Image (cartoon, rainbow, N blue to C red):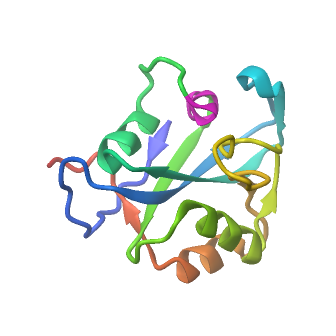
Amino acid sequence: MTATKRKCDAKRTPGRKGTYLLFLTFTEQRNIQVGSLGTLNTEAGEYCYVGSAMNGLDNRLKRHFSDKKKIHWHIDRLTLSADSMEAYVPSIPTEECRLAAAAEECGCLPVFSGFGSSDCRCRTHLFRVSGASKPKLLSASAAEPYDVTQQE
C-alpha cells in the first residue's frame, strides 16, 4: 500500500483532536467482510472515509496506514485491503458529521449504510468518489495533505 508523500503543515502535538478525510483506492473489485455490517462489495475506484480522533489524530492516522493492527473499527478492514491511501486534515476545525455532509454535497456518493456512523445519525461516513468530487471536497473543507511518514 502506498501513502501520500506530501507534507502537511499542521503541527503535530500529542493528543491533538480533529477530523480527517481518508481516501482509499482499490484497483479491482473486492468483497470485504465488515464485521456485523456484513460484506462490502467495493468496485475498483476511489472511496472517501470521514473520520475523527478526539484523543490523538496523529496516532489514529498512523494506525490507519499500518499493516499490523488489531481490527477495531469498520475502516480497519478497508485499510488492510486498499491498494493505496491518502489522508487529508481540514485546516479549519470541522465536526465529523458536517464533514460527511460536505462530502455528499460535493458529489461523493454515500455507500454502505451505517459504515463509520454507528455513534451518530448520519447514513454513512463512507463515500464513493466520483468525477470532480474529490477536489471540490478538499477545497470546501480547506483540507491539507497529511504525510503519515513524516517524522515528528
The quadrant in which residue 115 appears is: top right
Q: Main secondary structure of the magenta part?
A: helix
- Is residue 32 at least partly visible in the picture? no
Count of labels in the image: 0
41 relative position to 5: left or right: right
151 relative position to 67: left or right: left
Q: Is residue 94 depicted above or below 78 in this figure?
A: below
Choose between 66 and 49: the one closer to the eye.
49
Q: Pinpoint residue 28: horizontal percent, then vertical percent.
A: 77, 37
For the point 79% across and 53% down, the residue is 123
Q: Pinpoint residue 35: horizontal percent, then vertical percent.
A: 72, 21
The quadrant in which residue 112 appears is: top right
The region drawn magenta spans 73-80
Does 74 lie within the magenta span? yes
Furthest toward the left, the residue is: 152
70 relative position to 55: left or right: right
For the point 38% across and 50% down, the residue is 54
31 relative position to 56: left or right: right
- Is residue 84 at least partly visible in the picture? yes
Q: Pinpoint residue 151: horizontal percent, then vertical percent.
A: 17, 47
Choose between 30 and 119: the one closer to the eye.
119
For the point 54% across and 82% down, the residue is 139
Does 146 lie within the magenta span? no
The quadrant in which residue 81 appears is: top right
Choose between 21 and 4: the one closer to the eye.
21
For the point 75% across and 69% down, the residue is 104
Q: Is residue 36 depicted above or below 147 in this figure?
A: above
Q: Pinpoint residue 134: horizontal percent, then vertical percent.
A: 64, 70
